Image (tube, coloured by chain):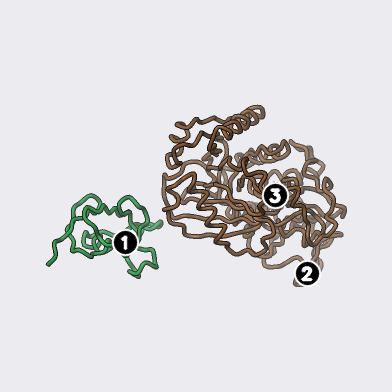
Chain colours: A green, B brown
């Protein structure tokens, strides 16, 4: 069992396994990735970087495709 | 079939829509013919910057008068038009451009338009995402932005309330001598025909000096608060003597959604309406020189369209040698701004009403007809590089 890494989802610490995608970390935290313009919760659909549904802010970069990014230590993930 | 009416307006872009509303409001029976959809040509391709321009007295007169008409209309515009007086900041990169900022401020001040000279730190405060080291800028708070296709749709709806009839999906085969022929063989008789088909106008009125000038725009995903004002670079001054046929300039607009609309490019002799990625790359490079953070934002759509350019940068508004045929075209990058004034001046002329500003500078008769109607050419008269304001 590899050493877990710690990230922050909306400021709350979360331990995930190395290699975990940001989209999965958000799911573990019980959040949706973003809220659509119409007010609906959004999360990963294609999980391969095509559909843009899983966007969130990662380390200050808005609209990052979270299914395509692996968690790194101390990463700050903000859902909208 | 020969239905008759008082006036036929060719084209339901924002200029045609405004003309239809003015004429219908004056009590004329109006038919509007649109090949595609309302506001689908240059109206949909452009930025929607409602700006007072100072390239010439005539251009200032038309843009500022039209801006006042937009401001009067603003309270009744539907929310989808997204009319927002965010102001323009003309960005100066160096001291030479700051001289232009002060000249511009004095020009506006002498004509009753308030503006504010920003030094480097005031510019940085106004727009924190601009790079450090710029010299300053000129803030013109009264300028606005809007979403033009919705505005054209609104003007057409209001014209329809005044009994204007809209024919969609039909092309005009010929127009003149009191008659318009459509591609389904419908003939419409009318004593007044207004050619408001933008860059397509010479196809129906051969010989007028209107040329296609292609432009590209990029729209980003939503980044609220990244940008507050419409920003336009003044850097075109230094490259004004370039002979390049293609030019780009930094021009970015905040949309109410938080999206950023990024321009701009100008190309003569580009007939293909497709996106030219070489030009798009040059636009992004240019923008990144001013606003480095832009380069890492997500663009969601890129498109191109055709402005209707004239040799002297002024539109063609008014009568032609054919007593039934009138023009309302050639607005280049300012058609959204100047549409309402164009329509008002044309209606004033047709109805014999006095106008707040003279029509003379825009009369088609100021220009000779091009000797070769199929290729109106006057590239020597046009600077190759210039600021792109819409």
A33 or B131: which is nearer to us? Answer: B131
Q: Which residue lies most toward the left here?
A: A1
Q: CA distance from mark 1 to mark 2?
A: 56 Å
**Whole-percent x and y of residue B88?**
55, 39
Depth check, mark 1 against mark 2: the one in front is 1
Q: Which residue is mark 2?
A: B186
Task: State whether residue B73 appears in this view.
Answer: no
Q: Is residue B254 visible?
A: yes
Position of residue A24 in the picture relative to residue B257 (left or right): left
Q: Which residue is mark 3?
A: B331
Residue B195 at what x, y percent from top left? 76, 56
Q: Residues within 10 Å of mark 1 (few under 14, many from 20)?
A: many
Q: Is residue B373 left or right of residue B297?
A: right
Give the letter of the chain under mark 2: B
Instruction: Name the residue that disc number 1 marks.
Output: A66
Local crowd size for mark 2, using a 10 Å CA cut-off: few (<14), some (14–19), many (≥20): some
């Amino acid at each position: 069992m590899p050493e877990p890494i710690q990230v922050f989802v909306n400021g709350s610490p979360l331990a995930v396994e190395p290699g975990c995608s940001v989209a999965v970390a958000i799911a573990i935290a019980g959040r949706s990735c973003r809220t659509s313009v119409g007010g609906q919760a959004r999360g990963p659909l294609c999980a391969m970087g095509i559909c843009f549904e899983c966007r969130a802010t990662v380390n200050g970069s808005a609209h990052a495709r979270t299914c395509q990014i692996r968690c790194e230590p101390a990463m700050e993930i903000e859902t909208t | 079939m020969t239905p008759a009416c008082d006036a036929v307006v060719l084209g339901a872009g924002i200029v045609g829509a405004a003309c239809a509303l003015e004429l219908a409001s004056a009590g004329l029976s109006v038919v509007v013919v649109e090949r595609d959809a309302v506001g689908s040509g240059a109206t949909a391709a452009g930025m929607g910057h409602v700006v007072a321009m100072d390239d010439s007295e005539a251009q200032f007169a038309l843009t500022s008068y039209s801006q006042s008409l937009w401001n009067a209309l603003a309270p009744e515009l539907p929310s989808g038009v997204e009319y927002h007086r965010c102001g323009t900041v003309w960005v100066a990169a160096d001291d030479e451009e700051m001289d232009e900022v002060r000249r511009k401020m004095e020009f506006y001040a002498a004509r009753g338009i308030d503006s504010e000279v920003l030094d480097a730190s005031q510019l940085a405060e106004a727009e924190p995402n601009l790079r450090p080291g710029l010299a300053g800028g000129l803030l013109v708070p009264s300028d606005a932005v809007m979403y033009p296709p919705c505005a054209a749709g609104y003007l057409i709806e209001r014209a329809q309330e005044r009994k204007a009839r809209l024919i969609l999906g039909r092309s005009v085969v010929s127009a003149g001598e009191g008659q318009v022929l459509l591609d389904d063989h419908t003939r419409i008789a009318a004593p007044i025909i207004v050619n408001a088909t933008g860059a397509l106008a010479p196809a129906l009125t051969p010989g007028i000096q209107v040329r296609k000038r292609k432009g590209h725009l990029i729209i980003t995903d939503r980044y609220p608060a990244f940008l507050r004002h419409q920003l336009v670079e003044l850097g075109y001054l230094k490259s004004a003597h370039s002979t390049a046929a293609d030019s780009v300039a930094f021009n970015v607009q905040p949309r109410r959604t938080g999206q950023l609309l990024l321009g701009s490019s100008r190309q003569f002799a580009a007939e293909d309406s497709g996106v030219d990625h070489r030009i798009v790359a040059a636009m992004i490079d240019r923008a990144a020189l001013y606003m480095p953070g832009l380069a890492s934002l997500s663009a969601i759509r890129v498109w191109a369209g055709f402005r209707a350019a004239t040799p002297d940068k002024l539109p063609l508004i008014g009568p032609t040698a054919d007593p039934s045929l009138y023009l309302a075209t050639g607005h280049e990058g300012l058609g959204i701004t100047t549409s309402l004034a164009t329509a008002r001046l044309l209606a004033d002329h047709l109805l014999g009403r006095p106008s707040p500003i003279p029509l003379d500078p825009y009369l088609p008769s100021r220009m000779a007809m091009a000797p070769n109607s199929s290729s109106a050419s006057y590239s020597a008269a046009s600077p190759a590089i210039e600021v792109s304001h819409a």
